[in-house]
Image (cartoon, rainbow, N blue to C red):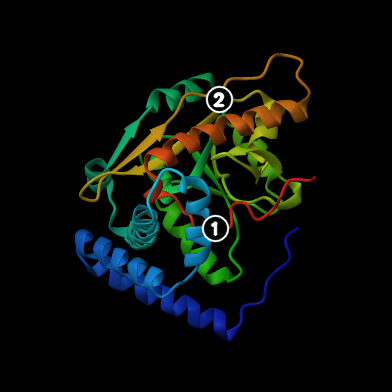
């Protein structure tokens, strides 16, 4: 049972600020809100907020391929993308069925359709890329989506974020003590969506990511290995003029029958991580480089 967290005066202030900011963002036209978010992201980069981390990552991955000027522009645009994404997320109450149809295009929906027809459920693994929160709109398009989400320290803000996701019809399962909720959703034929591209510490599985060994959450791969449900990589690619493409990729190939669970989990994890890598190399400015992705080093 999750421990109840105390709500402090600071939490209430943060929540009030978040609600006020959301109301202001919803009052703005979509294009104005999007570019205001980009400007705030640009300012965060100029102020040096996690800039050293971001540039260090980009030099590590692209130092032999891109000039210093190109690397700095990728970094700056990554901040702009995050700013745009944050403001677009705040405007979810303004995103009705007609608006979703206008700004979100689904590619690879046949892979979701196949999973729904089978009725055994599926795992949709996404990354911090483009506007990843737009995966919630799959529920508005008729897919039975369950989100596995981390809990914010501020429970009031956490509730606000989950209400924005749930307004499209998404079922929410908290990451803490989530295993029973995940298996229940799969038994009910639902598609369980989770972000799985950040540092997982010593408990993660080390796989190759952009030429570097990276600790990666083992959950999606282990669940797929134990249950046999398809594991689908998916990313939200930002397109021009406020439009987005939700790209659902084919299922990661299943390891040969009889493969031990740990080996199968590693193969699944490497499989979807390699898919993410292809998109990141093509659109590096859409990735969330501010996270310390390679913080945990592999054992000697």
Is 85 in front, or is 183? 85
- Provide the secondary structure element on which disc 1 rests: loop
Horizontal and vertical percent for residue 38?
Answer: 30, 63
Q: Residue at x 20, y 49 (%)?
A: 241
Residue 26 found in image quarter: bottom left
Q: Residue at x 53, y 19 (%)?
A: 118
Horizontal and vertical percent for residue 238?
Answer: 32, 46
Q: Residue at x 29, y 68 (%)?
A: 39
Horizontal and vertical percent for residue 174?
Answer: 62, 53
| Vertical side of 269 occupied by 99: above or below | below
Q: Is residue 36 left or right of residue 222?
A: left
Viewer can see residue 144: no
The answer to whether the residue labelled 2 contacts the one labelled 1, judged by CB atoms less than 8 Å apart, is no
| Vertical side of 43 occupied by 232: above or below | above
Q: Is residue 293 left or right of residue 237?
A: right
Is 198 in front, or is 68? 68
Quadrant (top left, top right, bottom left, bottom right) of the N terminus: bottom right
The numbered dot on residue 252 is 2
Label 2: few (<14), some or many (≥20) within 10 Å?
A: some
Mark 2 vs mark 1: which is more N-terminal? 2
Viewer can see residue 294: yes
Is 270 in front, or is 124? 270
| Vertical side of 93 occupied by 110: above or below | above
Label 1: few (<14), some or many (≥20) within 10 Å?
A: some
Report the residue that reaches farthest toward the top.
Answer: 257
- Provide the secondary structure element on which disc 2 rests: loop
Q: Residue at x 25, y 41 (%)?
A: 101
Report the residue that reaches farthest toward the bottom.
Answer: 9
Q: Which residue is mark 1?
A: 291
C-alpha span from label 2 to label 1:
25 Å
Quadrant (top left, top right, bottom left, bottom right) of the C terminus: top right
């Amino acid at each position: 049972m999750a421990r109840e967290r105390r709500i402090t005066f600071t939490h209430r202030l943060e929540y009030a600020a978040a609600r006020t900011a959301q109301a202001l963002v919803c009052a703005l036209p979509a294009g104005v809100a999007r570019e205001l978010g980009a400007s705030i992201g640009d300012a965060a980069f100029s102020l040096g907020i996690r800039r050293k981390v971001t540039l260090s990552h980009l030099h590590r991955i692209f130092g032999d391929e891109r000039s210093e000027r190109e690397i700095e522009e990728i970094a700056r645009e990554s901040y702009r993308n995050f700013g745009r994404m944050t403001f677009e997320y705040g405007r979810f109450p303004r995103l009705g069925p007609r608006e979703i149809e206008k700004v979100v295009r689904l590619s690879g929906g046949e892979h979701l359709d196949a999973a729904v027809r089978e009725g055994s459920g599926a795992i949709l693994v996404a990354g911090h890329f483009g506007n990843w929160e737009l995966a919630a709109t799959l529920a508005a398009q008729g897919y039975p989506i369950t989100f596995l989400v981390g809990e914010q320290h501020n429970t009031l803000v956490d509730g606000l974020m989950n209400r924005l996701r749930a307004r499209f019809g998404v079922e929410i399962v908290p990451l803490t003590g989530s295993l029973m909720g995940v298996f229940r959703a799969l038994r009910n034929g639902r598609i369980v969506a989770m972000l799985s591209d950040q540092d997982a510490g010593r408990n993660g599985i080390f796989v190759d990511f952009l030429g570097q060994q990276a600790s990666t959450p083992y959950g999606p791969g282990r669940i797929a290995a134990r249950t046999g449900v398809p594991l689908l990589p998916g990313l939200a690619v930002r397109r021009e003029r406020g439009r987005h493409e939700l790209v659902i990729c084919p299922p990661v190939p299943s390891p040969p029958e009889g493969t031990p669970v740990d080996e199968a989990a590693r193969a699944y994890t490497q499989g979807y991580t390699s898919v993410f890598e292809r998109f990141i190399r093509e659109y590096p400015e859409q990735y969330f480089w501010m996270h310390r992705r390679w913080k945990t080093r592999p054992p000697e």
